[in-house]
Image (spheres, helix red, strand yellow):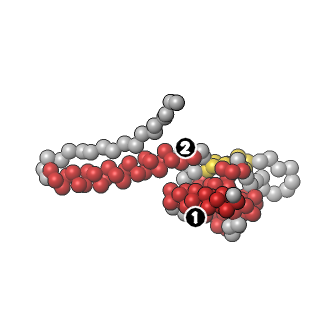
């Protein structure tokens, strides 16, 4: 049973890595989802990534709005740490679907314009979420 869970986790990590275009981002994203928020020190320990890799990854993911953060109030001297959270998987997939739509539309319009020559018509491909009501 443990073996199938590890295999399943690796396939999820691979799929998210393809979406985020980075293995480190994938590991940080999955860790934050599972923990429902964490400080950078916890992310470093949990992902086993190098501290500078985690800091750089968190910064890039925050800039790309893949994660958000909340400042923690700290009574001790020094910087107040952040608590990081991942965006929902649904939001991540919506962004990815939008990116794929753009790519598909470029390809479709390229092929369509080549066939029609001067009579250029636009093609629009849209990915919709299907909600099953059972």
**Looking at the rendering, in which quadrant would you find the N terminus?**
bottom right
Q: In this view, does 33 lie above or below 50?
A: above
* Residue for badge 1: 23
Q: Nearer the viewer, residue 119 or 115?
A: 115
**What kind of element bears circle 2?**
helix
Q: Earlier in the sequence, mark 2 or mark 1?
A: 1
Q: Can residue 55 be seen in this view?
A: no
Front residue (pair 70, 11): 11
Graded by Cα atoms within 10 Å as few (under 14), some (14 to 19) or many (20 or more), the crowding at tag 1 reads some
Q: Farthest front residue?
A: 1
Number of marks in the rendered image:
2
| Residue drawn at (50%, 56%) of the image | 19
- Going by the picture, which residue comes out furthest to the top? 133
Q: Alpha-carbon neighbours of circle 2 within 10 Å: few (<14), some, or many (≥20)?
A: few
Q: Picture quarter containing residue 60? A: bottom right
Quadrant of res 79? bottom right
Q: In the visual, does 132 lie left or right of 24?
A: left
Q: Name the residue under label 2.
A: 90
Could you say which is closer to the camera, residue 106 or residue 1?
A: 1
Image x and y of residue 129, in percent: 46, 39
Alpha carbons under labels 2 and 1: distance apart: 20 Å
x and y percent of residue 85 in the render? 67, 48
Provide the secondary structure element on which disc 1 rests.
helix
Name the residue at 66% across, 50% down.
33
């Amino acid at each position: 049973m443990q073996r199938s869970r590890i295999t399943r986790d690796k396939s999820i990590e691979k799929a998210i890595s393809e979406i985020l275009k980075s293995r480190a981002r994938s590991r940080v994203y999955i860790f934050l989802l599972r923990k429902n928020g964490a400080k950078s020190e916890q992310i470093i320990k949990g992902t086993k990534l190098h501290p500078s890799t985690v800091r750089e990854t968190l910064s890039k993911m925050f800039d790309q709005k893949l994660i958000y953060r909340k400042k923690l109030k700290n009574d001790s001297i020094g910087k107040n740490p952040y608590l990081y959270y991942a965006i929902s998987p649904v939001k991540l997939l919506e962004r990815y679907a939008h990116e794929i739509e753009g790519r598909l539309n470029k390809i479709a319009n390229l092929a369509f314009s080549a066939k029609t020559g001067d009579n250029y018509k636009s093609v629009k491909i849209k990915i919709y979420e299907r909600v099953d009501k059972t």
